[in-house]
């Protein structure tokens, strides 16, 4: 299955409750992901294995980067227990707005300019070993999930939500 990145929009009140007691947070997170249907697509999202390439193309780094570019995929503050690849993270509503701003300013056509398979391979961007082989098809995969991510953050920002995110 591999590492995927997942995102769940929550109200500020829900986030504050989990900041007080994160015991039920993993169950809540996975239940919200499982509930996603077309009418709730703006509430949760899993972007499969595209997360590492999107983060790299936004920040130029594998795991780091500076806000606001680092916010959409690996940003925010840790909350709760380790979920396998670290704890869940959360973005506050102002951070969600900043993440949305970054994604809104970088349309897929601009992101494509940053898709250099040789650089992704050299940096060992997950899933490593595929970028040269996949070429243009690799970007089509990334573009699909990038557009889903842009839509998710636009909706969360418009609603004034916070976002929970995790690599699982």
Image (cartoon, grey):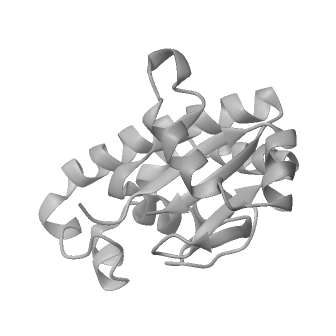
Residue 69 appears in the rendering: no
- Tell whether 139 sits left or right of 76: left
Q: Which quadrant, please, contains the C terminus?
A: bottom left
**Image height of 135 relative to 15, above or below:** below
Residue 150 appears in the rendering: yes
Q: Which quadrant, please, contains the N terminus?
A: bottom left
Q: Residue at the location (79% across, 37% down)?
A: 11
**Image height of 160 relative to 113, above or below:** above
- Tell whether 11 sits left or right of 148: right
Coordinates of residue 27 in the picture (x, y in percent): 55, 51
**Image height of 133 relative to 43, above or below:** below
Of the pair 44 and 97, the residue shown nearer to us: 44
Query: Hey, which quadrant is residue 118 in on the image?
Result: bottom left
- Tell whether 100 sits left or right of 7: right
Coordinates of residue 51 in the picture (x, y in percent): 44, 59
Q: Residue at the location (47% across, 75% down)?
A: 85
Query: Hey, which quadrant is residue 19 in on the image?
Result: bottom right
Q: Residue at the location (58% across, 28% down)?
A: 42
Please give the count of numbered marks on the rendered protein: 0
**Image height of 38 relative to 119, above or below:** above
- Tell whether 16 sits left or right of 124: right
- Which residue is farthest top? 39
Coordinates of residue 77 in the picture (x, y in percent): 75, 68
Q: Residue at the location (46% across, 57% down)?
A: 5
């Amino acid at each position: 299955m591999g590492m995927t990145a997942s995102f769940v929009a929550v109200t500020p009140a829900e986030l504050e409750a989990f900041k007080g007691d994160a015991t039920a947070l993993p169950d809540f997170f996975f239940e919200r992901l499982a509930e996603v249907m077309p009418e709730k697509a703006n509430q949760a999202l899993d972007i499969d294995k595209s997360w590492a390439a999107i983060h790299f193309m936004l920040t130029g780094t594998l795991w780091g980067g500076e806000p606001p570019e680092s916010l959409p995929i690996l940003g925010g503050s840790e909350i709760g227990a380790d979920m396998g690849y670290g704890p869940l993270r959360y973005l506050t509503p102002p951070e969600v707005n900043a993440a949305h701003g970054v994604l809104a300013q970088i349309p897929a056509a601009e992101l494509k300019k940053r898709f250099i398979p040789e650089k992704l391979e050299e940096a060992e961007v997950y899933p490593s070993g595929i970028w040269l082989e996949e070429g243009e098809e690799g970007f089509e995969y990334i573009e699909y999930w990038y557009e889903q991510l842009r839509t998710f953050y636009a909706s969360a920002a418009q609603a004034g939500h916070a976002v929970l995110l995790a690599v699982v």
